[in-house]
Image (cartoon, helix red, strand yellow):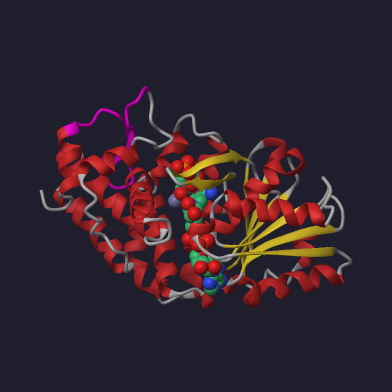
């Protein structure tokens, strides 16, 4: 097992990465206020992993209730959040009850937000079971739900007590979901870690083949990058916005196509190539660099051709992005591989051209 920490003073917490961690109740016990937990999961993950996590906790004397949600991005909303509150209240859960999110980013974001708000705040633990959630969503404390008008529009910054990433769970993950996770892994290389991007270029085939050592390293290095950024800028007043590379375009795709049609990681990959296209039009990125980005996403088996929503619809959807400042859309753009910047200093005509015809202009 490897461990790294998110350094947030007295809210510092560990990320454990390794094999067979689900069954290691001893890793969770020190983080409980009292021996009562509510495991929140979904209908897909429950039959695979709920008992693997729950039974060792029961054996250690912990009272366990489970809350099984419907599965899918389309359920990351206030109605599903209410199902969590209902179950917590029906079971008379107290402020000392710890919520445990067992699943992908949807379960993690919902559970984290329930933890931030139930009784005005109860502790929670992240047990991510998708690649995307192990490298990104379980770390850093962004929690929340979607609104029909925009992605993740309602939420809170609320940090977990612990992240437990058991890489064995990735063996049951559908290939499409694995690829979606790789989009966020590649993101770290693009925004701030050129050596990692070069390592990914050399090892992408091992990652798609789920090679254990390569996967362990990619998860560790991704979490290391995310933990550093979050420790430096927990509430996104500066550097943290770089983690949004591809997301202003990507969230527009997810919402514009209907939540769940494009996976989050797929939309981020296509959105990142739209950001690359605009960066190239601005003269900030060379054709060769765009080609390198295109190649690694394709090798990761990600779709890169964004849906033709039309520039007006894209701009309408992107106008609800959380980075909008004084009515102006701010974008994460590339000034080379390994160097992203947040900018509102782009040419609007170039942005429209990207939205109408990315990768072809
Ligand atoms: N909070 C953050 O910082 C942050 C970061 C990135 C993404 N997100 C959010 O995370 C969500 C995407 O997360 P995701 O990609 O994990 O999607 P997801 O949570 O929808 O999980 C993907 C699918 O895999 C299934 N699944 C989970 N674990 C499995 C396993 N081990 N084996 C088989 N199936 C499994 C799920 O039930 C689901 O059907 C989006 O809502 C996105 O906005 C949040
Ligand atoms: O942790 C962050 O900060 C991120 O931006 C990570 C993103 O991968 C994640 O999808 C995040 O939820 C998007 O940011 P949001 O603030 O628009 O929800
Ligand atoms: Zn994301």
- The range drawn in magenta is 326-348
Residue 62 percent across, percent down from the top left? 86, 64
Residue 309 percent across, percent down from the top left? 24, 50
**Residue 258 sits above or below residue 52 on the image:** above
**Residue 340 sits above or below residue 130 on the image:** above
Q: Is residue 132 visible?
A: no
| In the displayed structure image, the side of residue 64 where residue 298 appears, left or right | left
**Residue 71 sits above or below residue 321 on the image:** below
**Most foreground residue, 290 or 36:** 36
Main SS of the magenta segment? loop
- Residue at (25% x, 48% y) in the render: 274
**Most foreground residue, 151 or 339:** 151
**Most foreground residue, 41 or 75:** 75
- Magenta span includes 329: yes
Q: Is residue 274 visible?
A: yes
| In the displayed structure image, the side of residue 191 where residue 151 appears, left or right | right
- Residue at (60% x, 39% y) in the render: 157
| In the displayed structure image, the side of residue 157 where residue 292 appears, left or right | left
């Amino acid at each position: 097992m490897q461990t790294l920490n998110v350094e947030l003073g007295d809210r510092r917490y560990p990320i454990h990465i390794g094999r067979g961690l689900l069954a290691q109740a001893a890793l969770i016990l020190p983080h409980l206020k009292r021996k009562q937990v509510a495991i929140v999961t979904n209908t897909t993950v429950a039959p695979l992993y709920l008992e693997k996590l729950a039974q060792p906790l029961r054996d250690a004397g912990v009272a366990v209730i489970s809350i099984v949600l419907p599965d899918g991005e389309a359920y990351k909303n206030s109605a599903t959040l209410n199902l969590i509150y209902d179950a917590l209240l029906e079971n008379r859960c107290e402020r000392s009850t710890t919520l445990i999110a067992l699943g992908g980013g949807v379960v993690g974001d919902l559970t984290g937000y329930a933890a931030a708000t139930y009784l005005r705040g109860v502790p929670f633990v992240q047990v991510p079971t998708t690649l995307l959630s192990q490298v990104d969503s379980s770390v850093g404390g962004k929690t929340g739900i979607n609104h029909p008008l925009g992605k993740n529009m309602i939420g809170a910054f609320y940090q977990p007590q612990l992240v437990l990433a058991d890489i064995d769970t990735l063996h049951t993950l559908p290939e499409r979901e694995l690829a979606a996770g790789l989009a966020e892994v590649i993101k770290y290389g693009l925004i701030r870690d050129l050596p990692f991007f070069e390592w990914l270029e050399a090892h992408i085939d091992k990652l798609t083949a789920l090679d254990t050592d390569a996967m362990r390293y990619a998860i560790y290095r991704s979490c290391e990058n995310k933990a550093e950024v979050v420790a430096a800028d927990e509430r996104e007043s500066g550097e943290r916005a770089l983690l949004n590379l591809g997301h202003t375009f990507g969230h527009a795709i997810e919402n514009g196509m209907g939540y769940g049609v494009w996976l989050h990681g797929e939309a981020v990959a296509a959105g990142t190539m739209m950001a690359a296209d605009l960066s190239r039009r601005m003269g900030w990125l060379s054709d060769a660099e765009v080609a390198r980005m295109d190649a690694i996403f394709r090798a990761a088996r990600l779709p890169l051709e964004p849906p033709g929503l039309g520039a007006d619809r894209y701009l309408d959807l992107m106008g609800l992005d959380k980075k909008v400042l004084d009515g102006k859309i701010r974008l994460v753009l590339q000034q080379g591989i390994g160097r992203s910047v947040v900018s509102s200093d782009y040419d609007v005509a170039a942005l429209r051209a990207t939205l109408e015809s990315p990768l072809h202009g």
